[in-house]
Image (cartoon, rainbow, N blue to C red):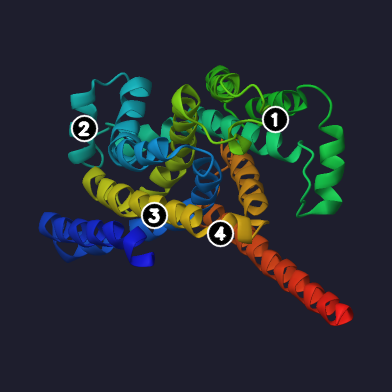
């Protein structure tokens, strides 16, 4: 199974590294490899969440996500998306934005670089992505669940979560606080607008997905097997989720290189492909059913990422911290899942001995 699931990703990685070498020599090859590792480390929680949604989708929509979805992830989110941000926020046409990315202005010219223009747009994008991810996290922890991980915290949160639209209220307050205390005066209105759009996007996609499954009222992450329009809206949900995750990786990539070709090869072809393969492996292997706390750990990692994005509107947060938080939380969830399984096995053996 491992070879079948990861085979294409390995081939794409080899080809991407070869292209990077031909494009910029040994230095480009090394940078491309580093970016691929960066993307996988930052997006492992994304893969877990993708798997929780993907296993609820029909086989047809799973194939759509793994084919058309990967094209969107590679070219759309890792190449076109950053260019579109520069295009919209800086008022540059797409051709000029791409030219600026490939040919940075010389230092001291007084002209802002592609990297700087993209960084200047961070408050708006962080607000949009932060609110989308925060809504996903809040809707998870405010729901009453049979299995809880951090029971001392999750059970009380599930009780207060019975208040109607509490997640919207909490997210709205978080957005106001981020805009008021984090954003510069010139950015405050755009941060509020971007955050509001992120909240509306989540509610819209979540609502449209639930509309075609009236028996389900818990949102995309817990939907029954979805076909037709429901599958389409879950597909859209996954793509918006990927966009929310990918921007953080794109910004982090500029600490390594500003070359959009290397970024597309490393983050897109290598990183995004491996994230998709991890997603498929989790679904086919039944990992989420076997290690029941992984989904919880991934959602807490998303909550942490949402908080980091909102905080980063006013304070720079190192990308290493962002990646480590997700790895630590998911790692802790996996370890406690293993401990839970061993305890259950031991209890089962004890009961068998008693019966004998």
Q: Which mark is residue 98?
A: 2
Specify the quadrant that holds the N terminus: bottom left
For the residue labelled by badge 4, is the local secondary structure a helix, a strand or a loop? helix
249 and 334: which is toward the camera: 334
Q: Which mark is residue 287?
A: 4
Q: Which mark is residue 274?
A: none
**Residue linked to disc 1:** 174
Task: Determine contact: label 3, label 4, CB under 8 Å.
Answer: no
Specify the quadrant that holds the C terminus: bottom right
For the residue labelled by badge 1, is the local secondary structure a helix, a strand or a loop? helix
For the residue labelled by badge 2, is the local secondary structure a helix, a strand or a loop? helix
| Mark 2 / mark 3, whichever is N-terminal | 2
**Residue sitting at the far front:** 356
Residue at the image point whose x is 55% and y is 52% from the top: 322
| Mark 3 / mark 1, whichever is N-terminal | 1
Residue at the image point whose x is 35% and y is 36% from the top: 64
| Mark 2 / mark 4, whichever is N-terminal | 2
Relative image position of residue 181 (x, y in whole percent): 67, 30
In the visual, does 130 lie left or right of 170? left
């Amino acid at each position: 199974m491992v070879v079948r699931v990861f085979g294409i990703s390995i081939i794409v990685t080899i080809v991407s590294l070869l292209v990077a070498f031909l494009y910029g020599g040994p230095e480009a090859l090394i940078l491309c490899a580093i970016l691929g590792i960066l993307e996988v480390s930052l997006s492992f929680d994304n893969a877990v969440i993708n798997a929780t949604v993907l296993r609820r989708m029909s086989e047809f929509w799973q194939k759509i996500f793994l084919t058309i979805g990967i094209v969107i992830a590679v070219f759309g989110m890792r190449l076109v998306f950053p260019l579109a941000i520069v295009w919209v926020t800086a008022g540059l046409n797409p051709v000029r934005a791409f030219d600026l990315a490939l040919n940075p202005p010389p230092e001291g010219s007084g002209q802002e670089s592609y990297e700087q223009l993209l960084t200047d747009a961070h408050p708006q994008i962080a607000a949009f992505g932060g609110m989308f991810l925060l809504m996903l996290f809040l809707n998870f922890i405010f729901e009453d669940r049979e299995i809880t991980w951090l029971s001392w915290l999750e059970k009380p949160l599930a009780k207060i979560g019975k208040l109607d639209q509490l997640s919207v209220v909490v997210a709205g307050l978080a957005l106001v606080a981020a805009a008021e205390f984090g954003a510069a005066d010139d950015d405050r209105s755009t941060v509020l607008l971007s955050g509001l759009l992120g909240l509306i996007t989540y509610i819209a996609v979540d609502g449209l997905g639930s509309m075609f499954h009236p028996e389900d009222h818990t949102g995309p992450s817990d939907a029954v097997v979805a076909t037709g329009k429901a599958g389409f809206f879950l597909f859209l949900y996954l793509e918006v989720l990927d966009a929310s995750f990918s921007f953080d990786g794109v910004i982090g990539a500029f600490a390594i290189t500003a070359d959009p070709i290397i970024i597309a090869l490393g983050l897109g072809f290598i990183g995004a492909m491996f994230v998709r393969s991890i997603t498929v492996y989790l679904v086919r292997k039944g990992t989420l059913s076997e290690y029941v706390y992984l989904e919880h750990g991934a959602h807490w990692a998303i909550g942490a990422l949402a908080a980091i994005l909102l905080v980063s509107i006013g304070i720079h947060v190192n990308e290493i911290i962002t990646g480590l938080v997700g790895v630590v939380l998911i790692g802790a969830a996996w370890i406690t899942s293993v401990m839970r399984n061993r305890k259950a096995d031991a209890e089962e053996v004890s009961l068998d001995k008693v019966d004998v």
